[in-house]
Image (cartoon, helix red, strand yellow):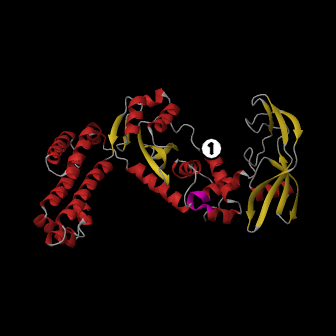
């Protein structure tokens, strides 16, 4: 078997010739050259006129055990009329302007999907910043350029990646269940940048957008996607009322002080906030005691549960009437947190009612945010948003990797 054939099978790289190889202190160094005669531009890949030859360069390839493998070649520079200048020629074994082969970068990106960077650096023998740079190159290369096409139903949410209000905004396609866009910030200007990239024609095709009650997101959607129905996430509506219930509980603790009524409120927080089907026997006893000893707090509990029942209605007409009845009850409940919550819900009434028609929530967006939180946690945080956004696209952007792993038998 010829050396070229042997090394091609060993390296798993085609379109190259092997001129020589030797074992050094750094590992196995294989002298290679492209199989094509005319040089090709590293930018556009088209044939170009040779300019001169650069110094010998090495590319890191997948090793065998502790043995590192390097591909060695002196690349030419070419004068490309399409790219308008002198650029380094294209080589078939590595991306342009990278010191690692295609297979090496693919495996690093795959390991970064399923593990933390520390383990990737140990397994692959590269530095921490190098892992992030490889991930960014793989994402730029494999991320679907048509991911913004045919968007009909989107979900928008923000994610805090660092203390002191450092956020990124994510846009998710409900139909394909993947992240299609992300950027630093959480204002109307941030989401406007998404619509600028989307363009007015594609923005006009968006039928529905699920968001929380962020005024900035509402403004951007109304200005740039006029045909989209804004749907407020059910979870945020119920959390608004749950927070009001907790405020009533704390106010009652301060009001009643010690004694029988105070003992009834003690350790009642989770019993009040749980769903009815998750209540234990002890929780039910606590609620019965509150019903007997503290009418305002039990009324707040009933308001919370009644809103959840109103949001459960399947028929939009019945749900709308139930929500209007709830607003009337909350407004005259004499519980200030619920009066305030009722004003907020009345202000966003159309977007909340739209949930009954669309039956969409931000659940998938929150789920991807949990995945993003896991990515940030296993990396022990990110100082800047760009590496985190690259990891988000790598893990949740629909990128399919084909790492050079053994085939199961």
Vertical relation: 127 (above or below) 215: below
Relative depth, front residue between 242 and 37: 242
Vertical relation: 192 (above or below) 157: above
Percent x, y for residue 91? 78, 44
Q: Residue at x 52, y 47 (%)?
A: 397
Q: Horizontal placement of 80 versus 159: left or right?
A: right
Query: Can the viewer see residue 313 in this picture?
Result: no
Relative depth, front residue between 289 and 118: 289
How would you rate the neighbour count of disc 1 (Cα within 10 Å): few for under 14, some for 14-19, many for 20 or more? some
Snapshot quadrant of residue 262: bottom left
Vertical relation: 117 (above or below) 215: below
Percent x, y for residue 228? 37, 33
Relative depth, front residue between 116 and 66: 116
For the C terminus, which image quadrant? bottom right
Residue farthest toward the left in the current orientation of the protein: 292
Q: Residue at x 19, y 58 (%)?
A: 301
Percent x, y for residue 133? 66, 51
Snapshot quadrant of residue 53: top right
Main secondary structure found in the magenta portion: helix
Percent x, y for residue 266? 22, 70
Relative depth, front residue between 199 and 48: 199
Q: Horizontal placement of 58 versus 289: left or right?
A: right
For the N terminus, which image quadrant? bottom right
Q: Which residue is labeled 1 in the image?
A: 140
Q: Which residues are magenta?
A: 111-117
The image shows a total of numbered marks equal to 1
Q: Is residue 167 magenta?
A: no
Query: Can the viewer see residue 317 in this picture?
Result: yes
Q: Secondary structure at mark 1?
A: helix
């Amino acid at each position: 078997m010829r050396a070229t054939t042997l090394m091609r099978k060993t390296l798993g790289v085609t379109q190259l010739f092997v001129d020589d190889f030797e074992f050094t202190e750094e590992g196995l160094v294989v002298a290679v050259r492209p199989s094509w005669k005319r040089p090709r531009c590293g930018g556009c890949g088209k044939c170009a006129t040779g300019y001169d030859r650069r110094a010998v360069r090495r590319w890191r390839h997948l090793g065998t055990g502790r043995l590192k493998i390097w591909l060695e070649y002196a690349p030419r520079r070419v004068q490309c009329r399409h790219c308008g200048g002198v650029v380094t020629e294209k080589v078939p074994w590595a991306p342009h302007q990278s010191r690692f082969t295609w297979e090496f970068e693919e495996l690093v990106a795959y390991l970064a999907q399923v593990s933390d960077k520390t383990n990737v650096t140990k397994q692959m023998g590269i530095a921490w910043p190098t892992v992030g740079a490889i991930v960014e190159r793989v994402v730029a290369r494999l991320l679907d350029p048509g991911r913004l096409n045919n968007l009909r139903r989107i979900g928008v949410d923000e994610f805090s990646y660092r203390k002191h209000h450092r956020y990124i905004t994510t846009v998710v396609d409900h139909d394909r269940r993947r992240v299609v866009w992300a950027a630093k910030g959480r204002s109307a200007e941030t989401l406007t940048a998404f619509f600028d990239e989307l363009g007015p024609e594609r923005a006009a095709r968006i039928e529905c957008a699920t968001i929380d009650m962020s005024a900035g997101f509402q403004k951007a959607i109304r200005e740039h996607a006029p045909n989209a129905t804004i749907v407020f996430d059910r979870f945020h509506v119920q959390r608004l009322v749950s927070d009001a219930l907790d405020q009533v509980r704390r106010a009652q603790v301060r009001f009643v002080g010690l004694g029988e009524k105070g003992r009834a409120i003690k350790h009642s927080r989770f019993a009040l906030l749980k769903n009815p089907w998750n209540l234990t026997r002890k929780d039910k006893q606590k609620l019965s005691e509150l019903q007997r000893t503290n009418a305002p707090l039990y009324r707040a509990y009933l308001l919370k549960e009644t809103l959840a029942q109103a949001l459960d209605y399947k028929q939009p007409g019945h749900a709308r009437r139930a929500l209007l009845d709830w607003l009337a009850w909350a407004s005259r409940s004499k519980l200030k947190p619920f009066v305030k919550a009722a004003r907020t819900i009345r202000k966003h009434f159309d977007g909340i009612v739209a949930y009954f028609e669309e039956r969409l929530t931000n659940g998938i967006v929150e789920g991807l945010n949990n995945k993003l939180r896991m990515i940030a946690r296993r990396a022990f945080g990110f100082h800047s948003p760009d590496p985190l956004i690259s990891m988000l696209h790598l893990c949740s952007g629909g990128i399919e990797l084909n790492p050079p792993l053994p085939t199961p038998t």
